[in-house]
Image (tube, rainbow, N blue to C red):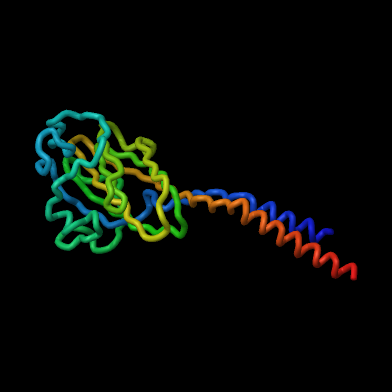
Amino acid sequence: MKSIRNLLGLAALALLPLQASATIIIDNSTTGLYNNLGDLAAIDGPGGFLLGANVSEGDPSYQLGGDPNLPFTAAFGTNWLAGNYAGGTWSANPVAIPSAWAVNSEAAIVYDFNLALASSLHIDVGVDNGLLVWLNGNFLFGATAGGGANINEYDIDVASLGAGSHSLQILLADHGGATGYAISVDANALPVSVPEPTGLLLLVSSLLGLGFVRYNKKRA
């Protein structure tokens, strides 16, 4: 009877979905490709996302509703959002990402990472003054604001990302005063799907059948 109880216990466990587990995959100590770009305010002109130096266009706070579609200069490489950095001014290898960069200038970062399982992502990021964020070349988020770089300034969530290699691409922007940057990214493995009812019934029946066979053999 003890064996049957053990088998029933295993069947009960099979009914439960696996719990998601959170893992920090990127933080302030994570290395990445880095690119000091200089002042790029001219590439999207007055009133664009990349504001003029020395707060000449004010110090606004707002979030973008979509990709600003910046006309990237040669300093970004052939196509940095597709992983092609030929001709750009990137670091040759991943380096430590500074928490501040030159005032009145822009900088770009690429974090390459790998997921063993399909996961959701939660991104906490803070910046002084603005940033644009892409995942695998797809625009996620853009905002600018005065003040310092609080790690909880912005929260960005990605509901589902498949297992494999990915790239988080970030453009940092400044328009005067000071700069600052901080980031933390959690990957939460998605729960395994619960088996269909028919499959569960078959599993439980098989386990019970095996248990009764073993029980009868002991009685023989």
> Percent x, y for residue 157?
39, 42
* Residue nearest the viewer, comparing 138 with 52: 138
Quarter of the N terminus within the rendering: bottom right
* Rendered position, 104 above or below 168: above
* Rendered position, 9 above or below 145: below
> Percent x, y for residue 17?
59, 50
On the image, which quarter does residue 62 sit in?
A: top left
On the image, which quarter does residue 104 sit in?
A: top left
On the image, which quarter does residue 74 sit in?
A: bottom left
At 79% from the left and 59% from the top, the residue drawn is: 4
* Residue nearest the viewer, comparing 130 with 194: 194
* Residue nearest the viewer, comparing 94 with 111: 111
At 80% from the left and 61% from the top, the residue drawn is: 3
* Rendered position, 86 above or below 158: below
Quarter of the C terminus within the rendering: bottom right
> Percent x, y for residue 133?
28, 45
> Percent x, y for residue 190?
49, 50
Which residue occupies the extreme front position in the image? 198
Q: How many marks?
A: 0
* Left or right, residue 175 beside residue 17: left
